[in-house]
Amino acid sequence: MFQIPPEETADAVKTALHIGYRHIDTTAMYPNERGVGQGIRDAGLDLAERYITSKLNNGCHRPDDARRAFDHTLMALSTDYVDLFPIHWPLPTPYDGDFVSTWQTLEGFKNEATGRTPAQVVLRWHIQRGDIVFPKSVTPQRVRENFALFDFELTDSDIDALTGLDNGEAGQTGPNPDRFDYIPR
């Protein structure tokens, strides 16, 4: 929502979502996150029907600053999570050449909307859909994570959002089961 005045943002977001846009991009730098959040709420869409990006402000790269900035973004948008929260611009110079620690801090945020790894979320998604799951790993920590699936549940919105990621044939990474004909000899 770059260069949209804060007082016009809510209406612009609501209109865009009603027309059919589903990805809304903002950042604290614009500064209209509150209006973006209001527009999203006013549009009345289910969480699974929209994709929200905000970004880490350039002056907030130190880990404690990044945490405060992320929390402020969630508060301004009035949401529990954003779908994407990248570094707005890597700035190694003012941070003694270090933007890796900033990235690592942001990686930590991704496990907070569930407190689970992406693999655990996907496995839990399969279980809640009634799919048969065969997790595999040789790494002891991942084997433990793959088994720790029965003390949390995904919401219906989470299930719908993950199910909505299906890209059909274009998103397939293995052979198509309808055409697979390999027989080992």
Image (cartoon, rainbow, N blue to C red):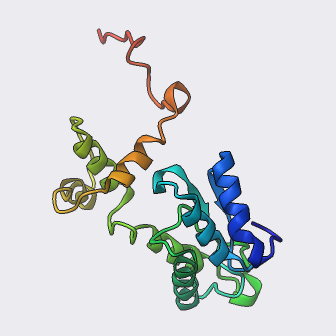
* Count of marks placed on residues: 0
Viewer-nearest residue: 143 or 138: 143
- Which residue is found at the position 23% from the left and 58% from the top? 140
Q: Quadrant of the C terminus?
A: top left
Horizontal and vertical percent for residue 107? 49, 70
Q: Is residue 141 left or right of residue 40?
A: left
Q: Is residue 172 left or right of residue 88?
A: left
Q: Inspect this view and state whether residue 147 appears.
A: yes
Is 127 rendered above or below residue 83?
A: above
Q: Is residue 7 left or right of residue 169?
A: right
Is 164 rendered above or below residue 79?
A: above
- Which residue is found at the position 70% from the left and 83% from the top? 97
Viewer-nearest residue: 71 or 42: 42
- Which residue is found at the position 75% from the left and 66% from the top? 1
Horizontal and vertical percent for residue 45? 52, 55
Horizontal and vertical percent for residue 157? 38, 53
Viewer-nearest residue: 120 or 140: 120
Is 111 rendered above or below residue 147?
A: below
Is 40 rendered above or below residue 133?
A: below
- Residue extending furthest right? 3
Q: Inspect this view and state whether residue 21 appears.
A: no
Horizontal and vertical percent for residue 132? 21, 35
- Which residue is found at the position 33% from the left and 54% from the top? 121
